[in-house]
């Protein structure tokens, strides 16, 4: 275990190590782990242990772009307890991952551009102190995997992924994920790039597509949108809905 010292400013010297049992989870599944504490040079009353699920989000403000960290779930995993000098204490926890949590890994590999984590907070001496960010790898739901695999079969190539600040219709998150692709196969004639967004729930998810066809030197860029729903009990319906959505966007802009 690797302990990290917290509350140094209060002379407490309490050390913390959070160990995730299953750092790779899917939305709707339970994240499990243990928070290990080791006391400092004196007895202290710990007033609470909290865990924050966090994400690095891109923010646009006018011409300025920057990244910031958003907490999207906060859960108390322990109440008040006495931590004796030099003593060790372990607190197991379980956190249900929200359905709308963005994907940060596919096929066991981190998704380029994504950073999710778990941050441990200790309440002591009337103040809060945060530990470092432990990486969290959220894998796609089976239905999301189906859509991603369908795009691969259609010739789209992964470009990058990121989180944008804002709330979409039907979503409760303060940000949304965009998985960006280069158009390929037959679709290269119609689109340059495609952005994919999921809004997942317990029984179904919405799929949002945004296609981009950039014009020439004297013409402007054009975007087209499409949104459809995929039920988890019928993920195969995503293939037809995906192709239909791509064709609709191409026709709407006169690209097809």
Image (spheres, rainbow, N blue to C red):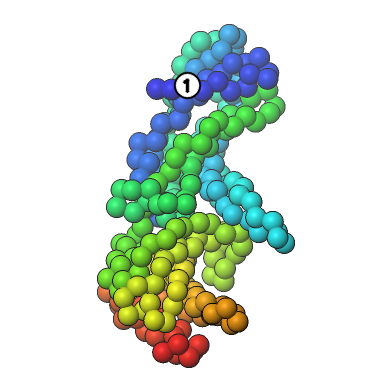
Position of 182 relative to 122 (above/below): below
If the image is split into quadrants, where does the C terminus sit? bottom left
Position of 135 relative to 167 (above/below): above
Side of 8 where 50 appears, left or right: left
Total marks placed = 1
Tell me what residue is drawn at x 46 percent, y 58 percent: 161
Residue 10 visible in the picture: yes
**Could you say which is closer to the camera, residue 222 or residue 162?**
222
Q: Position of residue 113 (x, y in %)?
A: 47, 52
Tell me what residue is drawn at x 51 percent, y 36 percent: 133
| Label 1 Cα crowd, 10 Å radius (few <14 / some 14-19 / many 20+) | some
Residue behind mark 1: 3
Q: Position of residue 129 (x, y in %)?
A: 62, 29
**Could you say which is closer to the camera, residue 138 or residue 190?**
190
Q: Position of residue 64 (x, y in %)?
A: 69, 56
Q: Position of residue 153 (x, y in %)?
A: 27, 71
Position of 246 relative to 175 (above/below): below
For residue 24, which quarter of the picture?
A: top left
Q: Secondary structure at mark 1?
A: loop
For residue 90, which quarter of the picture?
A: top left
Tell me what residue is drawn at x 53 percent, y 32 percent: 132
**Could you say which is closer to the camera, residue 213 or residue 132?**
213
Residue 235 visible in the picture: no
Residue sitting at the far right? 62
If the image is split into quadrants, where does the N terminus sit? top left
Tell me what residue is drawn at x 53 percent, y 15 percent: 39
Position of 98 relative to 214 (above/below): above
């Amino acid at each position: 275990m690797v302990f990290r010292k917290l509350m140094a400013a209060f002379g407490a010297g309490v050390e913390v190590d959070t160990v995730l049992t299953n750092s790779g989870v899917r939305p709707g599944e339970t994240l499990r782990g243990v928070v290990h504490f080791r006391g400092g040079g004196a007895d202290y009353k710990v007033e609470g242990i909290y865990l924050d699920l966090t994400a690095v989000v891109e923010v646009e403000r006018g011409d300025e772009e920057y990244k910031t960290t958003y907490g999207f779930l906060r859960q108390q995993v322990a109440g008040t307890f006495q931590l004796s000098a030099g003593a060790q204490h372990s607190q197991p926890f379980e956190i249900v991952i929200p359905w709308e949590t963005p994907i940060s890994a596919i096929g066991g590999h981190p998704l380029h551009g994504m950073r999710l984590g778990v941050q441990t907070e200790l309440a002591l001496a009337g103040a809060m102190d945060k530990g470092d960010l432990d990486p969290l790898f959220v894998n796609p739901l089976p239905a999301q995997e189906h859509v991603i695999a369908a795009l691969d079969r259609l010739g789209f190539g992964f470009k990058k992924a990121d989180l944008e600040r804002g709330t979409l219709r039907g979503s409760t998150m303060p940000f949304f994920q965009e998985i960006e692709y280069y158009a390929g196969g037959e679709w290269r004639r119609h689109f340059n790039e495609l952005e994919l967004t999921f809004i997942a729930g317990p029984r179904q998810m919405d799929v949002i597509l945004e296609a981009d066809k950039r014009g020439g030197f004297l013409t402007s860029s054009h975007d087209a949108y499409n949104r459809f729903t995929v039920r988890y009990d019928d993920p195969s319906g995503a293939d037809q809905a995906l192709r239909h959505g791509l064709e609709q966007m191409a026709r709407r802009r006169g690209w097809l």
